[in-house]
Image: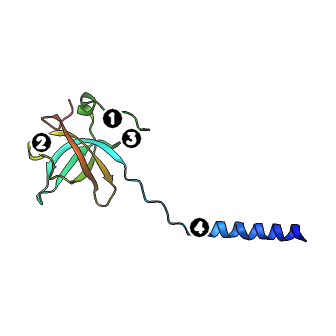
Amino acid sequence: MKTCDLVVGGALCLVTVVRIAAAQPEPPRKVPIVVVVGCLGQEVDDTWVVSSAANPIELGSKAPSPPSDAEAAKLTGTSRYRLIGTSEFSLPGHKGHKVRVEGLLIQAKPMNRLNITSVRHIADTCGAK
């Protein structure tokens, strides 16, 4: 009789654990830090964008090394990113230039956004070298 009580009690504990686990909220989505290389431009509403951009390269301990400036100069693509957090950077001096932008990638519609943490000049023109 004691064995039966123990088995039934264990089953009830297991059901309780499963219910608690199912009620836990999903962990927050990871916002990756990435490098994007493309052409810096300013829209008519004064927002800054990187266009003709290569796919983002995620930074981090498990990610491959970001491209060198020479490698970045050769990168091109069709992606566009709206830049946010731009007030700390001297973007007008890089307008129309190929740049390397690092920041937090925020996936959104109609355009992904980058909350930028650094901007580096790659080339005076947006064409590949």
Question: In the rendered view of the protein, which quadrant contains the N terminus?
Answer: bottom right
Spot the residue most to the left: 93
The CA span between labels 1 and 3 is 10 Å
Spot the residue most to the front: 2
Question: In the rendered view of the protein, which quadrant contains the C terminus?
Answer: top left
The CA span between labels 2 and 3 is 26 Å
2 or 3: tag closer to the N-terminus: 3
3 or 4: tag closer to the N-terminus: 4
Say which of marks 2 and 3 sits in front.
3
Say which of marks 2 and 4 sits in front.
4
Which residue is denoted by mark 4 in the rendering?
22
1 or 4: tag closer to the N-terminus: 4
Query: At numbered mark 2, what does the secondary structure look like: helix, strand or loop?
Result: helix
2 or 4: tag closer to the N-terminus: 4
Query: At numbered mark 1, what does the secondary structure look like: helix, strand or loop?
Result: loop
- Residue 69 vertical placement versus 78 (above, below): above
The CA span between labels 3 and 4 is 31 Å
**In the image, what residue occupies the spot 84% across and 71% down?**
5
| Foreground of the two, 9 or 129 | 9
Which residue is denoted by mark 3 in the rendering?
60
CB atoms of marks 3 and 4 within 8 Å:
no
Which residue is denoted by mark 1 in the rendering?
66
Q: Amino acid at mark 2?
A: His
**In the image, what residue occupies the spot 71% across and 66% down?**
14
CB atoms of marks 2 and 4 within 8 Å:
no
The CA span between labels 1 and 2 is 21 Å
- Residue 32 vertical placement versus 13 (above, below): above
Percent position (x, y) of residue 51?
A: 22, 47
| Foreground of the two, 44 or 65 | 65
Which residue is denoted by mark 2 in the rendering?
94
Q: Amino acid at mark 4?
A: Ala
Say which of marks 1 and 4 sits in front.
4
